[in-house]
Image: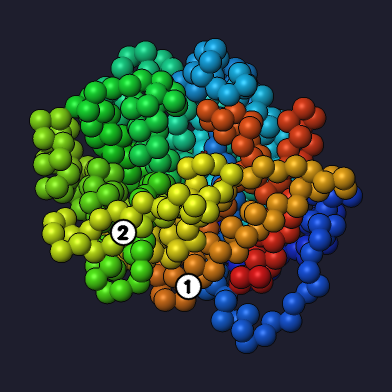
Amino acid sequence: MTADRSAPPGAAGTDRPSRRDLIASAGLGAVALNNVARPAQAQQSSASAARAFPPGFLWGTATSSYQIEGAWNVDGKGESIWDRFAHTPGKIQNGDTGDVAVDHYHRYKADVQLMRALGAGAYRFSLSWPRIFPDGVGAPNPAGLDFYDRLTDELLANGIAPFATLYHWDLPQALEDRGGWESRDTAQAFADYAGHAGAKLSDRIGHFFTINEISTFVDLGYVTGIFAPGLKLPPARLNQVRHHAVLAHGLAVQSIRASARPGTKVGPAENVAAVVPAVETSENIDAAERAMRELNAGILTVMLEGRYTDAFLAAAGADAPKFSAGDLKAIASPLDFVGINVYMPTYVRATATPPGYAVVPPARSHPRMASSWQVFGPESLYWAPRHLHKIWNVKEIYISENGCGAADQPAADGIVYDSDRVMFLRGYLAMLQRATADGVPVRGYFLWSLLDNFEWTSGYGTRFGLIHVDFATQTRTPKLSAAYYSEAIRRNALP
Ligand code: FCB
């Protein structure tokens, strides 16, 4: 089946069914979005027009395979490193696993209706590599790809543009057994899998993200060991792992170009250090631009410039990754867009001495969201995309993730009134709107996450969803933040 991708099906401003239809078809019943305390329809004043996003801006939500699908061993799926890690006692809070997760594998049709009820025009999900190649390489498992075929068709039938991530951390265990990301062969295996996925799905999927957050899975999986595969590598081996991951990204870009339908777009989804000038002076802004290149040198900068910066190589010294000129060329394969996951700021100030910037640590009393790592800093959603545009002239930017965890508790009426998440979204989206108003080419935004889900080492203890999930019954209930987000989508402006 082919679909016209020239205008993404869900772009804001295109004809869509009314919200009432959507809620009815979603079967949300007593807990429909309209039942959540919702302000009376605001009149579009000139002040609110000034808070508008560009026409055609894509509003989406994001998830990943291991965090939502469940069905960990059905229909021929192979074991992933997260299956193995979660099944190892003591690794995950409360002994939780993704074996069932939120059972999206079986409930995907109802979940697409939830997206539709929000009014979302796009959805970022990830393909489980071991579902498609149970051994990582070799013969594909057609039943694995079938699931993503069905999901893609369901999204398109509901006017939602599919954006697929090829790797969101669930490496086939068979590849880990052969050295995992420490082996260069894994980069080639990833490129082969990417080519297969591109060939099979690009008739309907127009955008592929290569790898989700290299920085996170490398640092947490191979330094602290709190993520799968749970290793604590010395610096030289760690730098080689990171190099293989950026190489895998570049080789996958080439495979997609070779195998996917012409016009298919591809780019990374990286958790950049989102550098913010602590005070907006021209000196601090220059310092922030310098810091943006250096603090992202091992991943985004090498992807966009085709070289590791001198400071990066000097700091690594004898532990620097081993690479060839050919590797750098592959890593810097031209991209169609850059996706960035932005959760928190890195504040910097200018210094008179090299490197010309200093990181300003957040004050001890600086506000944080429910996860202790998540410093509240809405300006990050202005500065990170602005830097991409200014420093590297990136012409198409997606916010591939943004959101926050919260200590969500349903009230007596069954609704989660997550005023903290609403505050978070209002602050961050205001700064994103500032970026688009300044001409920064941000084309879309994917809120993490559609549903509460398996939050890695925290198991089911930290909730990031717009939709509350009762993990015992799998009942889905939109939170107050779902009503807020839905209103932003409806207006294509900041509510
Ligand atoms: C990001 C991950 C995503 C989720 C959110 C909270 O770093 O990409 O899977 O865990 O954080």
User: Which residue occupies the foreground of this view, 354 or 467?
Assistant: 354
Mark 1 or mark 2: name the one nearer the start of the chain. Answer: 2
Question: Residue at position x 46%, y 20% from top?
Answer: 81
Amino acid marked by disc 1? Arg
Q: Secondary structure at mark 2?
A: strand
Q: Which residue is mark 2?
A: 348
Task: In the rendered view, tell whether residue 268 sits above or below residue 243.
Answer: below
The quarter in which the N terminus is drawn is: top right
Task: In the rendered view, tell whether residue 493 sits above or below residue 31.
Answer: below
The residue carrying pointer 1 sits among few (fewer than 14), some (14 to 19) or many (20 or more) residues within 10 Å by Cα, namely many
Circle nearer the viewer, 1 or 2: 2
Residue 75: image location, x then y, percent: 61, 20
Task: In the rendered view, tell whether residue 240 sits above or below residue 114.
Answer: above
Q: Secondary structure at mark 1?
A: helix
Q: Which mark is residue 393?
A: none
Q: Which residue is mark 1?
A: 434
Question: Residue at position x 43%, y 17% from top?
Answer: 173
Residue 323: image location, x then y, percent: 14, 34
Question: Residue at position x 74%, y 77% from top?
Answer: 42
Residue 280 lies left or right of residue 124; in this view the side is left
